[in-house]
Structure formats: structure tokens, C-alpha cells
Amino acid sequence: MDISTWLISLGVVAIAGFTRGFSGFGSGLILAPALSLLFNPQLVVATILLIDMTAGAGVVPGAVRKTKWQQVLPLVVSAIVMVPVGAHFLALLDPTLLRRIIGGLILGFVLLLLSGKSRYNRPRLVWTWAVGALSGFLTGLAGIGGPPIVLYQMSSRNLAAANRANFIVFFALLQVIALGSYWASGLISVAVGGLFIRLLPAFFLGQLLGQLCFKRVDEALFRRFVMGLLLTVAVLALVA
């Protein structure tokens, strides 16, 4: 890894960590398309999973107490079924095609979020199952199962703290299943471990800063920054 690639990687990982610490989600949305421009996408997706699991372990106990389990459990059950399906496709797809799929998915989700068309009035069980299944498939395929859940939960009447807890617990449960699926598909390797070890400190630093700034940073301004960043890396992943 040359020095420029190394510095860009650390910067991207630190920003993703800050986003995760501030909002409880979003790190994979930044890391998947950005790092796939620098490394093999299969390597990136498996590394993101390990980073997310390690970095999120410390906040899970506190989130469990605030989780709305009646909302989370149906999502988890439907998602678990689809994670191995997504992991199977991850192992088979051409890296360039996979990078463009990742970019296209994230671009679509960001545009949907910006349009405001994701709002709903009452959560229906059939939609809950469908959203959970889609999130599980995308987690297995590209490590980006967050957008369907985020759009669904943020359209509810929950307070921000409750949504944040739901995100953390949902993804923690899903990542355990994804790790087993990746292992079974041969996606966990020495190269994944090496990249994980090199990038983890930058993620931890960014996450710590994000947690400290949770009540100090203007949320609207930060949201615009993250949306702009996601749009940029999604377009780059599509055209590069």
C-alpha cells in the first residue's frame, strides 16, 4: 500500500467512524464505496464487517436498555434469513461489477432520503418484514444493510435516542450472522485481517470524536455534509 492510498484510507475511515459515533449508523455507507475504489470490494466488505463489529461492541449494552424490541425483532428475524443469500452473491460477483452495484445502491438510497419519499404513516408488519429482508440481503452482499432500516426507522415517530438504540442493536445482531456467512463463503482471510488491523485505530478515533460531539454539533449541518459525501463516493464508485 503506497503512502497516498494509506492516507486516503485513514481519512475515509476516520470520517466513517465519526459518523458512526455521532448517529449510530452510516459508517458502512461511507466505507463500502470509498474503500472499494482503493481495494478489492470483497476484501473491503469483509473488513467493514469486522470494523463495525469491534467498534460497536462497547455501545451495545447501553443501547439494549433503550431498544424498542417490538420494532427490532421482526426486522431481525426477516433479515437473518437473507444474509447468507447476499453473502453467496458477494463471493461470486466480479469486483468491478460489485463496486458499481454498491455505488448505485447508495446513490439510490441517498436520493430517496433527500426526496422525502420514504415517509410512512403507520408501520405495517408486511413492510417491516420486507425492509428487514432487504437489509439482510444487502448486509450479506455489500455490508450496507443500513439504508432500508434507517429510512424506515427515521420515518417513524421515535425520538432520536430510540432510533439510535434500535440501529445499534439491529446491526449488532445482524453482523454476527454475517460473520458466519462470510466465513462459510471463504471471504474471511489473512488479507482481511491485515487491513482490519491497520484501519481500526483511525475508526476508533473518529468514533470517539463523534460520540463526544453528539450533543454539540449542529445536526442539520452534519446531515448535509454526510449526504454530500455519500453522493460523491457513490458517483465515483459508479464511474471509476
Image (cartoon, grey):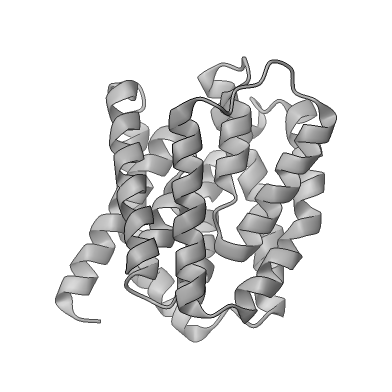
Left or right of residue 89, residue 201 in this image: left
In the image, 4 versus 52, the foreground residue is 4
Does residue 148 lie above or below 63 as drawn? below
Q: Is residue 222 left or right of residue 21?
A: left
- The image quadrant that residue 156 belongs to is top right
Give the x, y percent position of residue 166.
63, 32
Q: Position of residue 148 (x, y in %)?
A: 61, 41
Tell me residue 232's x, y (percent). 30, 50
Q: Residue at 28% across / 65% down in the picture?
A: 9
The residue shown at (62%, 57%) is 139
Front residue of 205 and 35: 35
Image position of 225 (left or right of 172): left
- Image position of 76 (left or right of 60): right
Query: Image height check: is 231 above or below 166?
Result: below
Question: Image quadrant of residue 132?
Answer: top right
Residue at horizontal 44 percent and vertical 58 percent from the top: 103
Instruction: Assign the C terminus to one quadrant of the image.
Output: bottom left
Q: On the rendered image, what quadrant is the N terminus found in? A: bottom left
> Which residue is rendered at x = 53% and y = 69% of the image?
46
Q: Position of residue 102 (x, y in %)?
A: 49, 60
> Closer to the camera, 223 or 120?
120
User: How many numbered marks are there?
Assistant: 0
- Can residue 73 be seen in this snapshot? no
Residue reaching furthest to the left: 3
Kindly tell me whether residue 223 is visible in this rendering: yes
